[in-house]
Each structure stands twice: as structure tokens, then as C-alpha cells.
Image (spheres, rainbow, N blue to C red):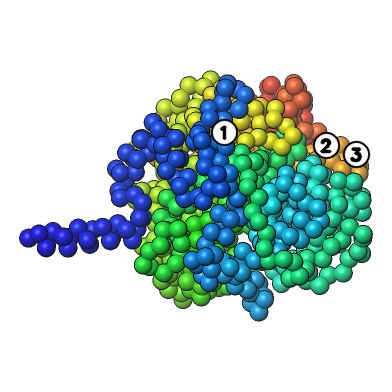
Amino acid sequence: MMRFLFVIIVILSTAIYGENPYVASPNAYKDFWEESIKNPEKFWDEQAKMIPWMAPYQTVWEKPESTNDAFVGKWFVKGKLNAASVCVDRFVPKHGQETALIWVCEEDSRSRIYTYKDLSIAVNQAANLLKAQDVKKGDRVGIWMPMVPELLITQLACAKIGAVAVVCFSGFSACNAEERFTDVQCKVLVTADGGRRRGKVFPLRPELSSAFLQSDFLKKVITCNNCSLAFSITTKDVPWNIGSMNEICDPEPMDSEDPLFLLYTSGSTGKPKGIVHTTGGYVVYALTTMKYVWGIQGLLFPHKEEREVWFSTADIGWIAGHSYITYAPLALGCVVLMYDGVVTYPTPERFFSLIDQYKVSHLYTSPTLLRQLASCGDTIPSKFTFDSLRVLGSVGEPILPETWQWYYEKMGKGRCPIVDTYWQTETGGYLISPIAGVTNLRPGSCCFPFLTINPKILRENGEEASTGEKGFLCIAAPWPGMMRGVYKDQNKFLTTYLEKFPGFYYTGDEAYKDADGYIWIVGRADDVIKVCGHRLGTAEIEAAISTFPGVVESAVIAVPDAIKGNDIVAFIVAKESLSPTDIKQHIHHMFGPIGVPKDIVFVPDLPKTRSGKIVRRILRNLYLGEQIGDTSALANPEIMEHLLEISRPV
Ligand code: PRX
């Protein structure tokens, strides 16, 4: 009898172990979450043990003196660490020969593999190259690169010497990138001559303006040769030849609260904001969320199964790539598969074949890519086994139940849980997500809050919304990975995130909770739009349009698109007859390809409130041929007659 019981216990525990080694059941998670809300410091103290601290922290969380000052307070106070050592060096003594990074490119012949030792050496050499350019702790280093290993290596090289990495997505135009790098006054810019997308080469370094290159703050531009593109060399140019640099570089002991990186993101108004993330809180948060949500053990928690192969289709130019390509998966000791180019090029088969070929176990992607794949039919995915897959993930935009089902059945073959992870650039890591293998899933819902995260859905007046009622998604208490501010504009931090609902962090999203407590994200409540999962500010695209000669003003709206989630439409008031093609080219140049509208509609005026605010809702309804609703509050109601004639429903 005892033997029989023992066998049952072993079978049960291996079954659970195989699913998620950290949480046993939905009820256990609920209890764990409740406990974590009561005592977040205890939880984070426990998780921080995953980090090799160079000096121990004295307090887990130092509460802010006043909620209005800085909702977040300080985390792991007085602790010292180095993020590059956490992500790479610590594995070298025991696991130096284990694979850290598999880099695959559109051109297969160029793929490369780095062990933890190789990566550690490359990071040290890149760090020494930066030091040779006089980069010191606290200096900002701009990074504008395609998805080459040198991008991730530069991020970690900055971390190694305490410089603040400022990555700009390579799909943004040079004008856009220069604006960000000027805002942070980067001492050095690391870039590439160009990148590859859909079999074509696009230039980066040759696109930089001479005005930017001559800026006083910019001392050097390091260019990695990726495509052998020519450009005119200046006295500031330095080639990326790290091979000749010393392989040893001592890690800079960084304070927990020292900034690790800045990442620009779009808001409702004006220019993009430089979101500040710190070293200790951010790294612990990214690591912990990945560990629990995906049930990953990596090299940190060795196990008998094969090592996890992590594949995220995100770009490091966005937060999804920062947290869950560079920092968390390496810090856990996963094999990171990094892809350069378009994963569906030349055909979607390319993407599917990568999974079987590299035995991907954990796949993280966006609903946009899934919609694109699903639209190609089932013949191609049915050719692949996807035997290695264990957990699937989605991020960046709401996933519709039919896309979820396709993902679950055609890729997960009905046996892999899907984690629909809700979070933001500002949050550093997951806020709301299922726990793989534990949460009972509902397609289209991000399910439940992560440990210590306390979300509330509020009405405009601050009261809590009732079950099923849409409201503003807010978080009631800070967490270690939360942004610490907006670079050089702390007031913006307060006004954008902390003032609307005092005592809460306001996400800018609308959501509702169902009767079982599942959270459903509805979408943005502000003028931020999501196109292919990319976060864009309507104000930024409008700013690009406004610099086209002859444009008086413009309003940009998002309209639904079956693949991209949303697409962009621009309404433009012009002084004279203008060519839509020329305006699109101008936006491409000023903003980058992702900001180019699918349609431009010329109008004599824009509908505005008496305080001068453009009523985008009216433009959207007009464009989509929907009911316009009440227009009596407009300052210029007479415009409606013209708009009804001009706008065209899709
Ligand atoms: O609107 C939400 C949406 O993406 C926004 C954050 O964008 P970004 O800062 O670029 O970070 C994207 C990757 C973390 C959010 O305010 N969003 C993110 N994840 C989801 C989502 N919407 C619905 N479901 C999600 N899982």
C-alpha cells in the first residue's frame, strides 16, 4: 500500500513538475498571490536571492515619503550588482561551454552560436572598446542597430561598465533616432552600416545627418560592418573591431537604483518619453516574472530535461526585446534564439521550420504575426511536428479568441498552454498573465495579476468599476521593475502616470474583470495606437506630417486591420493641393516606415472642441462609416457637412 501511494505521489509530482516547477495548482497560486500582496517585501527578498549581489542590499523596499513624490520608492537599497555579470559571467565557471545565444539571420549562412564563455568575452571586449572611447559610468550610449548579436553585446557591454544603454528601434528613421539620442546627449553611438529585411539591405550609419554627427555631445560613432555599405567617414568614426580588445573587463559595481537603460516610448501628447529603468529592481523583476510565468528553470535551477530554448520574435528596439531577449532569458540561463530579419521571409514556412530545427521550447510572439500565419491556411503548419514546444506566449496587443485557438491547436497541437502577457515599457515586466501549466486559461484574457501586483479597474471618478464594467486599469502598489521616471522630466512621470488616480499607477489602458476575476484588456484609453503591436503616438506622426510644406494641420487615427490589428489614417488640412505619395515618403523619412498611413484624407478643417482639442472619434466614425453621434459640443459644427462629403468609408 505504502509503495502504491509513493508511486502515485511521484507520478503526480512529476506531472506537475513538468508543467510548472514553482506553482502546484490554481488554488496554490491564488494563495501565493494573496500572501504576496500582504507581504511583498518577503516575496521580493526571496526572489532577489537569484542574483549574485556584489554587496548585499539593506532594505528590500524603502517606501516613498509621499505618494505624490515618487510612487515607487527604492528597491534593494544599497545593494550592488552588475547586470552583465548576472546575465552572462556568473554562468562561465560551471557552464561556460553551454550555448547562450543562437543567432539566425535571413541569410542562413551567416548564423552564429555563442556559448556563455564566448558571450562573456565578446561583452568584455565591447566594454573595453567603449572604455577606449572614454565612456564612463553614467554616460549614455546610443544604440541603433538591426537584430545582430552586436546589439545585445553592446547592451551588456554598457551594463558591464555602468554606462546607460539607449536603444532605438532600427525601423525608426534617422531623424527619429537622432531626436532620441540628442535628448539623452549620448557620448557614443553604436550603430551598423545597415540591416537586412525581406532580402533587402537598409542603411543606418549612412543615414545619419551631418548636423547630428557634428553635435558637441557626440564624441564617437562606432559602426559594425554588417552589409558592407559605404559611408563618408568622419573623425568621430570608429570601426567595431572588438577582436583586438582585451578579453577581461572588471564589472562596475552598480547601485540597485542606478539606471540600467533608458527606452523611449510614445504617449498621448508631444515627444516620446525616455523611460528610466534601474539595475536591481528591473533585473530581479524581469527574471522573476519569466521564471514563474513560463515555468523556466534554465541553468539557475538545473533539471533533467533538455535546456529550454527561448525564441521571441520581438525586436530588442522595444521593451519586449529588452526584458525577454536580453536580460531575463540570459539571466536564467536559457538558450536564446535571436532572429535577424523578417521571420516569414521568403515564406511563412521559414518561421515554422525554425521551431523544429532549433527545438524551440518556449515561443513568444505577437498577435499580428499569428494573424498573418493563420491567414496562410493550415497546410504549412501541419507539415511540422513542433514536438519541442512546451509553452506559447503572446504580447503587445489583445489576442482575439479565434487567433488564440489557432495558436493553441495548430502550433501548440493542443498540448501547450498560452501565456497572454500584459505589460508595458514602463512596467519593465509582466503585470497580468497566466502562469503556464497552472492557470485555467480563457482565450483572449490575460487572466490574473502577477505576484505582488494589485490591479484595480477604476471609473473616471476613482471608484472601483463593478464586474464586467469597463474602466481604467491601475495598479495599487509599486513593484521592483517599475519605471523610476521620465528622463529629464520628472513632472511628466507624475502627470502621466500618477496624478490621474492619486495613489495608483495609471496604465493608460481600459480593461474589465469578469465574474471569476479574469482580466480582459480592451485597449488604450489615450491617443496611443498599436500597429502590428508597435506602440506609436498619434502626436508623433502628426508632428512628422506638419513639417511637410503646405500642411496646415493633421489628425492621425487608428482603424482596424485584419492582420496588423490597426492601421493608420491621416486627415490633413492643406494650404494647396498636395501629393499623398510625397507626404507618405516624407513620413517614411521623418518617422520611419512603421508610421506611414495606409490612407490620407484631405479635409478643409478638423472637428475640434471649444478648447481646441481634435475630436478623433468623429474622424474615426466617419472613416469607418459608423454613426457620428453628438456633434453639438464642437467649436466648428459646420465642418460636419464637408466632412460627410469627403470622408470615405473603407
Ligand atoms: O495597450 C497595452 C498593449 O501594449 C501597451 C504597451 O505597449 P509597449 O509599451 O510597447 O509594450 C508592449 C510590450 C510589453 C499596453 O499599454 N498590450 C501589451 N500587452 C498586451 C496589450 N494589450 C492586450 N493584451 C496584451 N497582452
Q: Which residue is mark 3?
A: 575
Q: Secondary structure at mark 1?
A: strand
Q: Which residue is mark 1?
A: 74
Marks 2 and 3, the one that precedes in the sequence: 2
Q: Which residue is mark 2?
A: 553
Q: Tell me the CA gap for discs 2 and 3.
A: 10 Å
* Mark in the foreground, 1 or 3: 1
- Which of the two residues, 480 or 252, is positioned nearer the viewer here? 252
Q: Residue at x 17, y 63 (%)?
A: 7
Q: Residue at x 48, y 21 (%)?
A: 463
Query: What amino acid is at disc 2?
Result: Glu
Inspect this view and state whether residue 608 appears: yes
Residue 99 versus residue 471 in the image, above or below: below
Q: Secondary structure at mark 3?
A: loop
Q: In the image, residue 70 lies at what x, y percent?
A: 60, 27
Query: What amino acid is at disc 3?
Result: Lys
Q: Secondary structure at mark 2?
A: strand
Instruction: Check if mark 2's residue and mark 3's residue have beta carbons within 8 Å.
Output: no
Q: Residues within 10 Å of mark 2 (few under 14, many from 20)?
A: some
Marks 1 and 2, the one that precedes in the sequence: 1
Inspect this view and state whether residue 509 appears: no
Query: What amino acid is at disc 1?
Result: Lys
